[in-house]
Image (cartoon, rainbow, N blue to C red):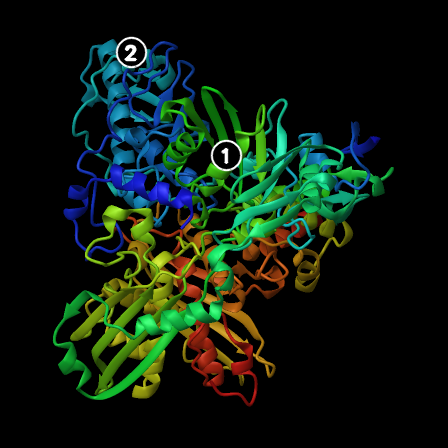
Amino acid sequence: MATTLTINGEAKSFDAPADMPLLWVLRDVLGMTGTKFGCGIAQCGACTVHIDGKPVRSCMLPVGAVRDRAVTTIEGIGASAAGAKVQKAWLDLEVIQCGYCQSGQIMSAAALLAATPNPDDSDIDAAMAGNICRCGTYVRIRAAIKQAASGRQS
Amino acid sequence: MTIAQKISAEKTSEQVSRRALLTGGLAGGFLLAFHLPVRAVNEPVQPPDVTDGKFAPNAFIRIDATGHTTLVMPQVEMGQGVYTAVAMILAEELDADFSQVTLQHAPPNDKLYGNPTFGLQVTGNSNSIRAFWKPLRNAGAGARAMLVQAAAQQWQVEPATCSTANSEVTHKESGRKLSYGALALAASSQTPPKDVPLKEAKDFALIGKPLKRLDTPDKVNGKAVYGIDAMLPGMKFATLAACPVFGGKVGKVDDSAAKKIPGVQKIVLLDDLVAVVGDHMWAAKKGLDALKVTWDEGPNARISSKDIWNDLRAASEKDGVVARSEGDIAKGLATGERLDAAYELPFLAHATMEPLNATVHLTPDSCEIWTGTQIVSRVQAEAAKAAGLPVDKVIVNNHLLGGGFGRKLEPDMVVAAVRIAKEVDGPVKVVWTREEDIQHDVYRPVYRDNIAATLLDGKIVGWKYRITGSAVIARWLPPAFQKGIDIDAVDSAVDMPYDIPNIQVEYVRAEPPAVPTGFWRGVGPNNNVFAVECFMDELARKAGKDPVAFRLAMLGKNPRMQAALNLAAEKSNWGQPLPARVGRGVCVQPSFGSFIATVVEAEVDEAGEVRLRRVTSAVDTGMAVNPDTIMSQLEGGLIFSLTAALYGEITIDKGRVQQSNFHDYRMLRIDQAPKIEVHVIKSGEPPGGIGETGSTAGPPALRNAILAATGVALRRLPIDRTLIAVGKKA
């Protein structure tokens, strides 16, 4: 099925079945491999993207359901204020180890900060508990979100 | 044992000479005791690459005429920060401008890039820095000396009158300068000097500083490329299902529905697995789901966890091969008050965040592979066998790893992908679903540890410790399996840090039927530190002593361990009052050449649910190349191991793994993560290993915290909530 989506502000046209999860459109059809496959059942958050600014697990989102809503991926998140702050804090605090889950972590954190500029620990728990990190970077993720939030105020 | 594993075991025995192994003993711990008789890592590349003006003094360093410095990484980056640490060591002795270096994955080549401990390209056993510390420093210093010689020749001065910094040679008196780029061509014709002096630690400009990692900037914007991200023109995508019963075969297949799925290109049927090839993963996955496969389950279809445990317990009652014996164990066990216990650890999956994958392009006379592996040369050799090609026709492009944890010390995923690629025209990316990844892992073995000890005047006088479990080494590195002892399985048991007069450590090899077992982050020490440290707390209780004081009294001959324990106790507020059902537990470990003490503070609610409040570790890992990496490895390793302690267990029923994805093979999440403090002790000792230490520290400290909080001495993992709920006793 011929489809056009707006991804990171650009119109992208492609052929894909309507039931195909957005994850595989991004990775296998469009070659945008920054969004990761982790579990396929929305349990790990590695595939998190934004749909109209809200974090969504792209492994279970049929591409036909996206319609005219804006898709943002890890490749484009740096263009948003919250995304850029999160990326900077992630590097400043050296959050990342293997990095495979971090596309999803950054997407979830950027969505949190865009919606809740000064999150407390329970906001962070609620927004980030859907993202598994096997390297165990949670302590630094929490600290980096707080740093990104405080940077926003200054 | 799968076919792939058998082949890999044979290959290893060819590659590591028995003589090399015999030069070592057990005392130094796992694998550190032996070395290859001939090392090539500091030899120049033959011939030096001068054709395009690059200075290539050894396997690790390339400098072009513009001064661009490329460092070739012998060890793989799977999150542990080794790319940055290796680059720091090379750049330190080279006096290179660290902000200008770029990194390259090493190709398969044991001679140039082999890990000196194994004689193979292996990233494992937390030994990257220990094994490569000297070779990398020699490589950097040798290259620097050649650049200095080239400059001195040009200036007609003595090399000793020149200094180096930031990729420049300076003639001190005249102030003349030449960049490494300008010297690259001339340096290429210099004779590599022998025995170049290395820097003294006080002169280090990079080593010891918490420098920013070189691999992380591309990991915040989606640019980092893992094996699973390989994209090639005309590539197809495949996913597979192996027989759910270990060792089972494909029986009947009805592919009529699968073939009708849009985008499905091909159904591949091999003897032990089926795969569907499509235009994308979605077509492949839908095709696989539509495939009706009847499996020939074979003789393993009746195996269950219950039987495996019964067999293991029976095996553990027999005498083992003695791995360490000191004093008089019979006399020791006949003295004082005796306590006996047995500890049990389950099968575990690795569950790397990046599911297993390999991309293969096979032609009649070549095979090119894109994947992320901890054993790139072994992967090349195994792929060559599977493809029926000579090794030199196989190109392996290694990648960043989305987690390794030991899973990628096995070549099975690449072998399967090559076998599938034989049926496909053009390149094919084979990606395992999470379910296949978890159900066809090479699992951390089940272990049982039987311990008997005697106490006299508050100290241990006799200690008999018997480990029963798989000999992973016997399969993975057969020449290292000698006299019936798996040197990994006994690691941190034969060299436990305590001073005990009468001691015996035994090993019983017991292989579970059908279930493949392998290395899992923390390897042998994971098991032994758990059992030793759990039992220490039970003995301390019996002796009426504080667990920290009880340990300190037996660590007199181990000042580094003692200092770490004192620091962890101080920083964790050891001994300060806590609310009801909250406890602190301690663990010390000498594993991987590092001395670490850890205190976990945990709360157990009335239902038996455990909340991790706080973890404090004190680490003496010798000279820390990058102290921030030391801290992050501890933080992450602790989460990794506490995850296993709280949730990790793979169980077997009817010959198949019962868990399948993160809903039933649970992971710790951020809302359950404790505060973690890591205190790095300054040390001038040679660097120790760090990548697996946190993985060893968490479970015994947590279990001891639960003992302190509830009075219940758990002896199995994962933690059984029903035993620690209010009103329950173990």
Estimate the x, y position of residue B67 in percent, counting from the top left: 41, 18
In the rendered structure, which disc, 1 or 2, sits on the residue that comes first in sequence? 2
Tag 1: residue type? Arg
Q: Residues within 10 Å of mark 2 (few under 14, many from 20)?
A: many
Q: Residue at x 75, y 44 (%)?
A: A50
State the residue in front, B356 or A132. Answer: B356
At 12% from the left edge and 76% from the top edge, which residue is drawn?
A: B328
- In this rendering, would A105 be left or right of A139? right
Output the chain of dot 1.
B
State yes or no: discs 1 and 2 in contact (Cβ < 8 Å): no
Question: Residue B547: where, in percent of width, then height?
Answer: 35, 79
Residue B123 appears in the rendering? yes
Q: Secondary structure at mark 2?
A: helix
Vertical order, B587 against B511 (above or below): below
- Given residues A29 and B559, the one toward you in this image is A29
Q: Left or right? Give the position of B593 relative to A134.
A: left
Q: Amino acid at mark 2?
A: Ala
- The x, y position of residue B541, in whole percent, is 35, 85
The percent coordinates of residue B623 (x first, y second) are: 30, 49
On screen, residue B388 versus residue B40, left or right, reads right
Residue with the mark numbered 1:
B419
Tell me: residue B682, above or below residue B159. below
- Residue linked to disc 2: B186
What is the secondary structure assignment of the residue under circle 1? helix
Which chain does tag 2 point to?
B
Taking B129 as reference, is B526 above or below it? below
Q: CA distance from mark 1 to mark 2?
A: 48 Å
Tag shown at residue B92: none
- Residue A118's place in the image compared with B286, above or below, is below
Question: Residue at coordinates 28% horizontally, 25% vertically from top-left?
Answer: B144
Mark 1 neighbour class, 10 Å CA radius: few under 14, some 14 to 19, many 20 or more: some
Q: Is residue B688 visible?
A: no
